[in-house]
Image (cartoon, rainbow, N blue to C red):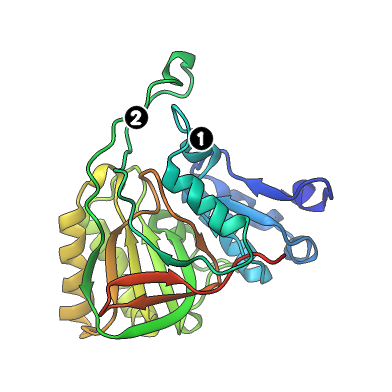
Amino acid sequence: MHEALEDQTIRAIFANIGGEDSVRTLSLVDLDVIKAHPKIFMGFSDTTITHFCFYKAGVVSFYGTSVLTGFAENGGMHVYQVRDIQRNLFAAQPVGQVLPNLEGWTSEFLDWGKPENQQIKRKLMPATGWRFLQGKGMVKGTLLGGCLEVIESLKDTRFWVQPEAWKGKIMFIETSEEKMPPHQFRWILRNYAASGILANIIGLIVARPYDNTYHQEYDEILLTVIRDEEGLGQLPIISGMDFGYTAPIFTLPYGVNAQIDCDQQTFSIVESGVID
């Protein structure tokens, strides 16, 4: 990563896929290299680690698709994905309102190691829209978050964002292809409650789970912990959103201002992550 940042012929860095061991790189990361060579970095899942490094360095990065799951989509990229990349990386204007994907979504696995699969389009499931679980009015704050399992591995490292620093943030979370069981989802949310993170954020957006598994259970837990246990019934929560482990997805730029309008049921990115 340092070589890619320091190489002046490279304009952007895209993760090939996720994984489970990016946390092992933390002792090697030089924040000064990131600060001195700000470039586009895009990925999701395990690259949450790298995104937090960029965030700590004060450089915007993009929580979005990877090479294998988006750019190399079987049969060609989804139109929703192409338009998202164009709006986030190739225009200096704010993205503006992000619309739900109406093409349909997929998390079907076709082995990338088999060339004959490359022309087989993955089966699309019907689009279900987003669920505005609670909240009133409009809130605006900076985006911060990532994959729940990976965020857990960041705690107590020098790259962790302490609870008080989540103040004014719109937190985004998603769960991995491991299909986190509901009880674990509840444990993590209760930890965020006990630490003060949930009381500090001004909004929470949640991705559609892999295969859409446990989406009803997750929604129930969100309301039980946040509304019933913590008394945060005004905190805007949107679930079932098009980012994370299903495709196609929209991109979330770290540290960039976004807006949730609960009354109009809209989500917008109101600041650009790139400059001319």
Residue 64 visible from this viewpoint = no
Q: Position of residue 9 (x, y in %)?
A: 82, 46
Amino acid type of disc 2?
Arg
Residue at 49% from the left image edge and 50% from the top image edge: 83
Residue 121, above or below 240: above
Q: Are marks 1 and 2 in contact (CB under 8 Å)?
A: no
Horizontal side, residue 231 vs residue 146: left or right:
left
Residue 223 visible from this viewpoint = yes
Q: Extreme top residue here?
A: 116
Residue at 20% from the left image edge and 85% from the top image edge: 231
In this orientation, which residue lies closer to the viewer: 77 or 31? Answer: 77
Instruction: Using a 10 Å C-alpha cutoff, classify the residue at mark 2 as few (fewer than 14 neighbours), some (14 to 19) or many (20 or more).
Output: some
Q: How far apart, in angstroms, are the residues tagged by discs 1 and 2?
A: 13 Å
Residue at 58% from the left image edge and 51% from the top image edge: 42
Instruction: Using a 10 Å C-alpha cutoff, classify the residue at mark 1 as few (fewer than 14 neighbours), some (14 to 19) or many (20 or more).
Output: some
- Mark nearer the viewer, 1 or 2: 2
In this orientation, which residue lies closer to the viewer: 37 or 127? Answer: 127
The earlier-in-sequence mark between 1 and 2 is: 1
What is the secondary structure assignment of the residue under circle 1?
A: helix
**Pointer 2: what residue?**
122
Q: Position of residue 258 (x, y in %)?
A: 46, 74
**Pointer 1: what residue?**
68
User: Where does the C terminus fall, quadrant-wise?
Assistant: bottom right
